[in-house]
């Protein structure tokens, strides 16, 4: 796919979609039902056992009560720990929010806070402000939506026009599907449309193709940078731990020397000499050592 494309399916009905390999730059996006995710869905087991590396994310509708929204977010978080959950910014999961309410920012802030409580630094989001119009494409800023119908023979032309009208490298396509079986039809239509674009608009095609390759390399570099950052933090914490131990030993030695200086060196000379004589009388020290520092001092 020339642009990042998300194929949106209802989560509880999408188990068989995992058997279909997606083209490059294409991702699954599973729509969460009105309630929270159910562990009994057949797709759960297939996600764990799937050998295909199709990346996926979730679409959440914000048009619900805050408590229900929080429940939906909590239920999807375990899935973000799957190895193939979509993360463009190293460890920040991607979630698409669908809404027509003006206070969507308040809900995304709630979602980000919930993710932070589970150990994430942040959450990447795509905001779909309005639902797509049935039977046609619907372009709003950087998002182009397609509500595909099998009987719709306009998709190829709409796809070509959408590609021609791209104004940003961050533009994305969202394909809303009723059934996973529509995927093969869409792939075929998109492939034919892109062939047409390559022939009729070669500059546009090659520019978008190059941008796609650059964005893939950018994600790889961000991932490597994230790994190096973790390694650096690990090394820093390692040195901080051992330096703290070293500093603790130095402090103890300093305290012992301070104790010696304060408790022994300040004693009067006659008291120290009396102590030396007492050691000789008790047999712990040799008599000659009182007059000669070169002889054996203590009796073992």
Image (cartoon, rainbow, N blue to C red):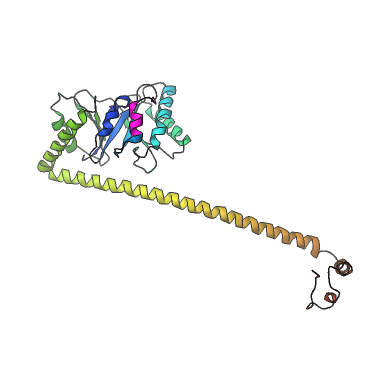
Please tell me which residue lies in front, 221 or 106: 221
| For residue 284, side relative to residue 255 (left or right) | right
Which quadrant does the C terminus fall into? bottom right
State which region is magenta: 36-47
In this rendering, the answer to whether 118 lies above or below 218 is above
**In this picture, residue 258 sits left or right of residue 14:** right
Query: In front: 85, or 62?
Result: 85
Q: Nearer the viewer, residue 35 or 145?
A: 35
Query: Up-down: is 287 above or below 18?
Result: below
One can see residue 126 in this view: no
In the picture provided, is 217 more to the left or to the right than 163?
A: right
Q: Residue 292's image quarter?
A: bottom right
Residue under the point 20% across and 43% down: 208
Return the x and y of residue 61 as percentages of the image width and height.
Answer: 35, 25
- x and y percentages locating residue 264 in the rendered image: 80, 63
Residue 26 position within the rendered picture, expressed as x and y whole percent measured from the top left:
25, 37
């Amino acid at each position: 796919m020339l642009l990042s494309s998300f194929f949106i399916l209802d989560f509880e009905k999408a188990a068989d979609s995992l058997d279909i390999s997606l083209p490059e730059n294409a991702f699954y996006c599973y729509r969460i039902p009105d309630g929270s995710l159910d562990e009994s869905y057949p797709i759960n087991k297939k996600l764990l056992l799937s050998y295909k590396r199709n990346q996926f994310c979730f679409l959440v509708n914000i048009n619900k009560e805050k408590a229900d929204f929080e429940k939906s977010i909590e239920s999807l978080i375990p899935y973000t720990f799957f190895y193939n959950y979509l993360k463009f910014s190293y460890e920040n999961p991607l979630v698409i929010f669908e809404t027509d309410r003006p206070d969507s920012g308040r809900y995304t802030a709630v979602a980000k806070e919930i993710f932070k409580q589970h150990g994430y630094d942040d959450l990447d989001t795509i905001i779909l402000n309005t639902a797509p119009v049935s039977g046609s494409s619907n372009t709003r800023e950087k998002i182009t939506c397609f509500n595909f119908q099998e009987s719709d023979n306009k998709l190829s032309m709409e796809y070509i026009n959408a590609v021609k009208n791209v104004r940003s490298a961050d533009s994305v396509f969202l394909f809303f599907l009723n059934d996973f079986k529509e995927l093969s039809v869409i792939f075929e239509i998109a492939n034919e449309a892109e062939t047409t674009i390559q022939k009729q608009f070669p500059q546009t095609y090659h520019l978008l193709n190059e941008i796609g390759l650059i964005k893939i390399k950018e994600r790889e570099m961000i991932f490597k940078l994230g790994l190096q950052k973790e390694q650096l933090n690990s090394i820093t914490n390692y040195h901080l731990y051992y330096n703290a131990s070293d500093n603790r030993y130095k402090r103890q030695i300093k305290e012992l020397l301070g104790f010696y200086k304060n408790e022994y060196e300040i004693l009067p000379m006659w008291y120290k000499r009396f102590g030396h004589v007492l050691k000789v009388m008790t047999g712990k020290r040799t008599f000659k050592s009182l007059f000669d520092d070169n002889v054996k001092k203590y009796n073992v």
